[in-house]
Amino acid sequence: MHVNEGATLFKQVDYSLLKLIHDIDMGEIGLPELQRPFVWTSVKVRDLFDSMYRGFPVGYLLFWANGSGNGTRQIGTKSKQKTPRLLIVDGQQRLTSLYAVLKGSPIVRDDYSEEKISIAFRPTDRKFEVANPAIRKDSEWISDISILWDERSSINRFTKDFIKNLQKSRKIDDKEEDNLFEAIDRLYDIQNYPFTAMELSQTISEEQVSDVFVRINSKGVTLNQADFILTLMSVFWDEGRKELEDFCRKARSPPTKGASSFNYFIQPDPDALLRVSVGHGFKRARLKYVYSILRGKDLETEEFSDELREKQFEVLKRSQKCALDLTNWHEFMKSLMSAGFRSEKMITSNTTLIYSYTLFLIGKLDFDVDKNRLRHLIARWFFMASITGRYTSSPETQMEMDLSHLRKIKKANDFVQILERIINDELTDDFWNITLTNNLEASTASSPALFAYYAALNLLDANVLFSKMKVTELLDPAIRANKSSLETHHLFPKNYLAKHGITEKIDINQIANLALVEWSDNIDMSDDSPTKYLKKYYSKVNKEMQYWHALPEKWDKMEYKKFLSERRKLISRVIHDGYKSI
């Protein structure tokens, strides 16, 4: 390994592939990616090996010197002789690919299924391919090149056996045999392929690391603070990161037996749950602060300390245990249901959900708020945060402000009063009468105001328009069918409006022109005028249904824009009434 001293921010280091693999095995370089989702396709791995075989450059690696830790340790069940000196900032997918193939190690795909990357090589024309059943049966191919670097085998013996097996199907002369030996030897020598890495100094900040990464990364990919913290977890608490990923994997499909994190509201990623743990444990939303102290950095002296790092990781461990506790997780989901929400289709912001879960944990575990009181408080908070878009713009900044109110209080009543005050400050009379009505002047199918209206219909136990079925029954996420049982119907149908010169989608698809109906009724209504199709359903519309679905008196005979204006006001009233029922 050759070292060149460069600028103060980094030094340039030359590695062979074999040295990189050795340092990963020893723990000198922290490569956590084998046990978490691997996003490269096998075809891309094939192309990587093809480029290296032909002597093409395959890019820089970017490492960051770890701030502390020189002792011995063990990550997971695999013994490492050293604490990683280098953290990988750029090149994880390449190094994962190379390590997985040279060591014959399986990787984990983004659906959390385990897979072995099998890259095949045909020595006769030196072609690489992703192994498939036909290749595995073809004696012309080395169906899995990983075998070349298996410590239990000899490359010379392997090549002789390969040629001997090939001779069973066709004749090989001396010249071709020499070519086969040369092709396989050259493939084996990929382990000596040269890599250049930039090792960033431990003294530079994570913001500088991100800046360097963006400047050298041609794809324009940016790093966030969660990426850094998850990498630190892989290095210093790999079991914790695996727990996060296992929780996320199980949240994606219903269990065949026993309890699991599966739910109908969110399929979380590790970085989302990390934010919960950080918010609960450190009362922080800005992850850059937490990242620094998890590295063992004293924010006053700028010095690094193993002792401080271990102390802060203990805080994270305790908080993550609470965040991944299935009782806490599903109790929080009951708060969402208490707010009238039924599934992920009604959730417009996962950030709002995650931050609400953070506040739930703080209320439950730090202040011991009564279970029922907390459930309805968090339900109101989630409703408020959703409908106002509280965490839509600069979410970290807003959550940091929310958490700052909770850092010095000691009592449950203080916690409740702070959240209630914020809710009341947001949901004023002007909000209900003016802001919300204006927000309903939209044509998007994913409007927070629209889903708040659906939530209100659930809370008010409303029937679907022209039906005896409940909205909450037909919004049940457990119902799966080829055709949705519940659809949005244009009260003033598209073709009817077109005949009257209204053709712009932004006008036709106004929220105030949509109503929830059963699928069969939507078909029946077709493109008739409201007055015409109402004759069929007139007997099904009573005062209560007219209220739920915000239908003005004699709405079918109204001028269209007047109808939209009046219905928006009535929808706002229904949403307000639904909220007050929580």
Image (cartoon, rainbow, N blue to C red):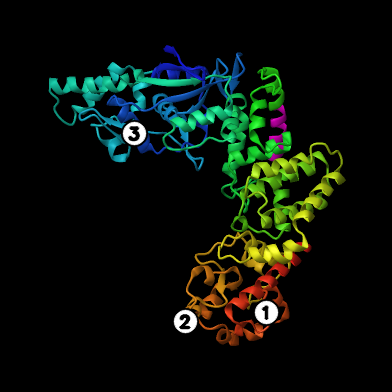
Q: Residue at x 79, y 40 (%)?
A: 406
Count residues near mark 3 (Cα–Cα under 10 Å), then give few for <14, some for 14-19, many for 20+. many
Circle 3 or circle 1, nearest the eye: 1
Circle 3 or circle 2, nearest the eye: 2
Q: Residue at x 27, y 21 (%)?
A: 186
Q: Can residue 151 be seen at all in this image of the molecule?
A: no
Per the image, label 1 sits on a secondary structure element best described as loop
| Amino acid at the residue labelled 1 | Pro
On the rendered structure, is 14 left or right of 213? left
- Position of 253 relative to 246 (above/below): below
Query: Is 63 in front, or is 213?
Result: 213
Q: Position of residue 173 (x, y in %)?
A: 12, 23
Magenta range: 314-325
Per the image, label 2 sits on a secondary structure element best described as helix
Work out whether mark 1 precedes mark 2 in sequence or the reverse, and give the earlier one: 2
| Amino acid at the residue labelled 2 | Lys
Residue, disc 1: 552
- Position of 551 relative to 110 (above/below): below
| Image quarter hosting the N terminus | top left
Residue 179 in the magenta stretch? The answer is no
**To which quarter of the image does residue 80 belong?**
top right
Q: Position of residue 340 (x, y in %)?
A: 70, 60
Count residues near mark 1 (Cα–Cα under 10 Å), then give few for <14, some for 14-19, many for 20+. some
Residue, disc 3: 46
Per the image, label 3 sits on a secondary structure element best described as helix
Residue, disc 2: 499
Work out whether mark 3 precedes mark 2 in sequence or the reverse, and give the earlier one: 3
State how far apart marks 3 and 2 are (Cα).
Answer: 58 Å
Count residues near mark 2 (Cα–Cα under 10 Å), then give few for <14, some for 14-19, many for 20+. few
| Amino acid at the residue labelled 3 | Arg
Residue 324 in the magenta stretch? The answer is yes
Query: Is 565 in front, or is 3?
Result: 565
